């Protein structure tokens, strides 16, 4: 099935979608707030022949992952009209300028006095990273009229931060801090939800390795640059006193060790690029993209390094590709597939084996893998527009067998 798209005309630097609200950062230091649910509901009312498809694609992306709803999709008499709506919607040009959204938008001053390299929203707190550190600002869910949703920003780190990622399963933030390494910050969600500014705890360096990107793999964290990658492995153990499950750092694994012997017609000592999230790890060489699954419940008491790696990582197969490694700019993983930015285009290697190519150099782009409702979306910001692309094929893919994209389960959802 083809993806569906909404285009919003304008110049934007970054985007976040959270709690039924689309937040667009511009280069002038302001944030455009859009009542996303209201805007899509209005669009659905005007396009009633595809209203279910619109709501599923742009408001309730988790709906068809529900085990109960998936059983409905197995019934051809019910699945056929739904697929028909999604197919029809993919052929409709949905393009909006800001005037079309005047009843659903407002502007706020950004709490950050710089253009962030990355942003993240976690338990009603918005984080921004940049050359001068990591900052946060509490966000009120429903601001009073003519008041800002943001408070003054607090600073948590002095060094450069390239990327910030919130955990699915633990109240922590992982940050890619360049030459300072992979750094984790504990997070107190109760403090954050109450609007307090001291929700961030003392940082901990997980790996003293150059790190420009990172993502969570259950209790562990993967970090990478354009020419190296590593895996900060954590175990889960029962605390003998409290009997609660605690997370303990185990070791740092070289990703090249995981894929040693797996690549075909390529030596892993040559140029390679690796990345990953959740259970999926990817290793790109000239011969293709090797895929491994991480097993977070692997054996812990094995002294032999090769055997430990074999327990932790399962080589699943290879995705064929002819990607020029010298053109790779950035990578990430979502339920609908894995995303690779090249010099002048964006590739989505879909979970159903197909490839989508978006031509043009983006200003910024992002996915929302933790989101309850928007994990099927890819936001691409170009100089004159934002394209919100919803991938609707993954609902009909066997989650346990796919190579591209991590397994999507409703119980994975966190705020």
Image (cartoon, rainbow, N blue to C red):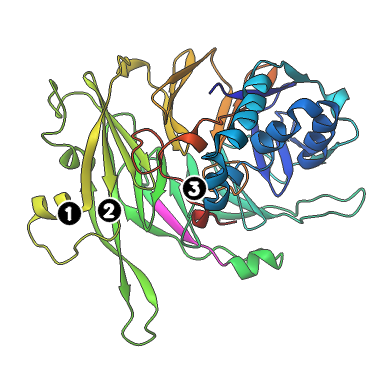
Q: Are marks 2 and 1 in contact (CB under 8 Å)?
A: yes
Q: Which residues are magenta?
A: 183-188
Q: Which residue is mark 2?
A: 295
Reply yes or no: does residue 253 show up in magenta: no
For residue 338, what is the image quadrant?
A: top left
- Specify whether residue 41 is in view: yes
Compared to 53, does 152 lie above or below? below
- Of the numbered discs 3 and 1, the one sitting upstream in the chain is 3
Residue behind mark 3: 165
Residue 404: give x, y in percent of width and height. 37, 33
Determine crowd level at label 2: few under 14, some 14-19, many 20+ residues with C-alpha closer than 10 A. some
- The answer to whether 387 is drawn above or below residue 69 in the figure is above
Q: Residue at x 83, y 25 (%)?
A: 98
- Residue 209 in percent (x, y) is at 29, 45
Q: Residues within 10 Å of mark 3 (few under 14, many from 20)?
A: many
Q: Reading the chain from its start, which is encountered first: label 2 or label 3?
A: 3
Q: Residue most toward the left?
A: 304
Q: Main secondary structure of the magenta part?
A: strand
The residue shown at (22%, 47%) is 313
């Amino acid at each position: 099935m083809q993806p569906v798209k909404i285009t919003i005309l304008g110049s934007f630097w970054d985007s976040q979608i959270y709690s039924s609200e689309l937040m667009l950062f511009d280069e002038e230091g302001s944030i455009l707030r859009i009542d996303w649910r209201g805007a899509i509901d209005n669009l659905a009312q005007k396009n009633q022949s595809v209203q279910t498809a619109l709501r599923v694609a742009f408001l309730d992306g988790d709906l068809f992952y529900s085990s109960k709803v998936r059983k409905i999709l197995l019934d051809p008499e019910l699945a056929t009209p739904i697929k028909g709506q999604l197919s029809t919607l993919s052929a409709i040009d949905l393009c909006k300028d800001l005037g079309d959204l005047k009843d659903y938008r407002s502007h706020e001053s950004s709490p950050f006095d710089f253009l962030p390299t990355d942003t993240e929203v976690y338990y009603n707190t918005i984080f921004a990273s940049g050359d001068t550190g990591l900052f946060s600002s509490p966000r009120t869910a429903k601001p009073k009229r003519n008041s800002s949703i943001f408070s003054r920003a607090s600073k948590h780190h002095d060094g450069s931060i390239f990327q910030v990622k919130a955990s699915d399963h633990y109240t922590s933030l992982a940050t890619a801090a360049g030459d300072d390494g992979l750094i984790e910050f504990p997070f107190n969600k109760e403090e954050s939800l109450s609007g307090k500014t001291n929700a961030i705890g003392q940082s901990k360096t997980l790996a003293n390795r150059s790190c420009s990107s990172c993502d969570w793999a259950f209790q562990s964290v993967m970090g990478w640059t354009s020419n190296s990658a590593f895996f900060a492995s954590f175990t889960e153990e029962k605390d003998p006193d409290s009997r609660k499950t605690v997370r303990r750092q185990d070791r740092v694994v070289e990703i090249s060790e995981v894929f040693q012997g797996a690549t075909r017609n390529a030596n892993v000592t040559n140029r390679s690029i690796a990345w990953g999230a959740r259970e999926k790890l990817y290793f790109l060489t000239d011969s293709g993209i090797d895929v491994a699954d991480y097993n977070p419940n692997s054996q812990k008491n094995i002294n032999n390094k090769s055997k430990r790696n074999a327990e932790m990582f399962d080589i699943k197969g290879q995705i064929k590709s002819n990607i020029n490694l010298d053109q790779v700019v950035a990578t990430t993983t979502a339920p609908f597939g894995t995303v690779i930015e090249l010099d002048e285009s964006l590739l989505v290697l879909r979970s159903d084996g197909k490839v989508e190519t978006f031509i043009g150099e983006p200003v910024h782009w992002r996915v929302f893998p933790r989101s309850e409702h928007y994990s099927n979306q890819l936001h691409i910001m170009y100089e004159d527009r934002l394209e919100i692309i919803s991938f609707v094929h993954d609902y009909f893919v066997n989650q346990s067998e796919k190579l591209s994209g991590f397994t999507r389960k409703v119980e994975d959802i966190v705020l």
